Image (tube, grey):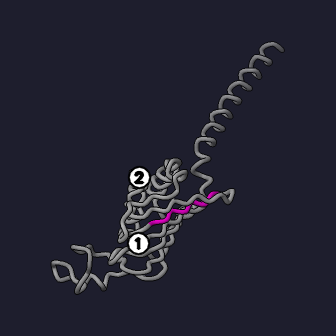
Amino acid sequence: MLLIINKKQKYSFIILAFFSLQLLIAQKKDSKEINIEKIEFVHEGYASQPNYIMGIFCDRTVIFYAIRDNFSLKYQGDIVPYGTDKLGNNIRSTEKKGFFKDKLTRIDFKEILNLVNQLDVEFQQQTFDDGQIHHSKGKLIVTYNNKEVKIIYDGGLNGSENLIKLYKMFDALRTESKWR
């Protein structure tokens, strides 16, 4: 009888160790995502391109500081001469200025984290420049829980495929979120 109890305890211990190991592996796998405290993106637009700062926090809160030229309606060309689109809608009246707040969906948040976690090479390079004088500029700042900060400067916003995907997500958030 004592032998059977020991075997049961042994199997219980093995099963417990197995599940603990699985949990530890899952936590290790997600630790890179969890340790990001804040993601900031500064977009300095050239000409009539938008100027804004966006911050995404670990609780999925997004802060959007619209500085200028953050229009909801799309326009044709590089400038907005009279502030109307082809249908005669007033584009200038759709401009957002000031501070706004929203909460990201879990899917969007996870997608942004995945893109940021794939930027190891870009963080090593730190600076991208397309060599032009007149272009929009971006700065990506990622702050980790251990207070480590990684920065990417991108003149022209053409740094890499993953950076371009991330910029498109920020731009979509800028125009599609329900800012309050």
Report crowding for label 2: few under 14, some 14 to 19, many 20 or more residues within 10 A (C-alpha): some
Q: Main secondary structure of the magenta part?
A: strand
x 48%, y 76%: residue: 65
Q: Position of residue 163 (x, y in %)?
A: 43, 55
Q: Is residue 76 left or right of residue 40?
A: left
Q: Which quadrant of the rendered structure holds the C terminus? A: bottom left
The residue labelled by disc 1 is 178
Q: Position of residue 31 (x, y in %)?
A: 62, 47
Q: Is residue 78 left or right of residue 32?
A: left
Mark 2 and mark 1: span between their CA atoms? Answer: 29 Å
Q: Is residue 123 left or right of residue 170?
A: right
Q: Position of residue 74 (x, y in %)?
A: 26, 73
Question: Magenta part of the protein: which range?
Answer: 138-144
Q: Name the element at disc 1.
A: loop
Q: Do the CB atoms of the residues marked 2 and 1 lie less than 8 Å apart?
A: no
Q: Which quadrant of the rendered structure holds the N terminus? A: top right
Q: Name the element at disc 2.
A: loop
Q: Is residue 158 above or below residue 95?
A: above
Report crowding for label 1: few under 14, some 14 to 19, many 20 or more residues within 10 A (C-alpha): few
Q: Is residue 19 left or right of residue 85?
A: right
Please tell me which of labels 2 and 1 falls first in the chain.
2
The quadrant in which residue 108 appears is bottom left
x 58%, y 58%: residue: 150
- Magenta-span inclusion, residue 179: no
Question: Label 1 is placed on what type of residue?
Answer: Lys
x 21%, y 73%: residue: 76
* Mark linked to residue 160: 2
Question: Label 2 is placed on what type of residue?
Answer: Ser
Q: Position of residue 158 (x, y in %)?
A: 38, 58
Judging depth in this view, the residue of 80 and 122 nearest the camera is: 122
Number of the front mark, 2 or 1: 2
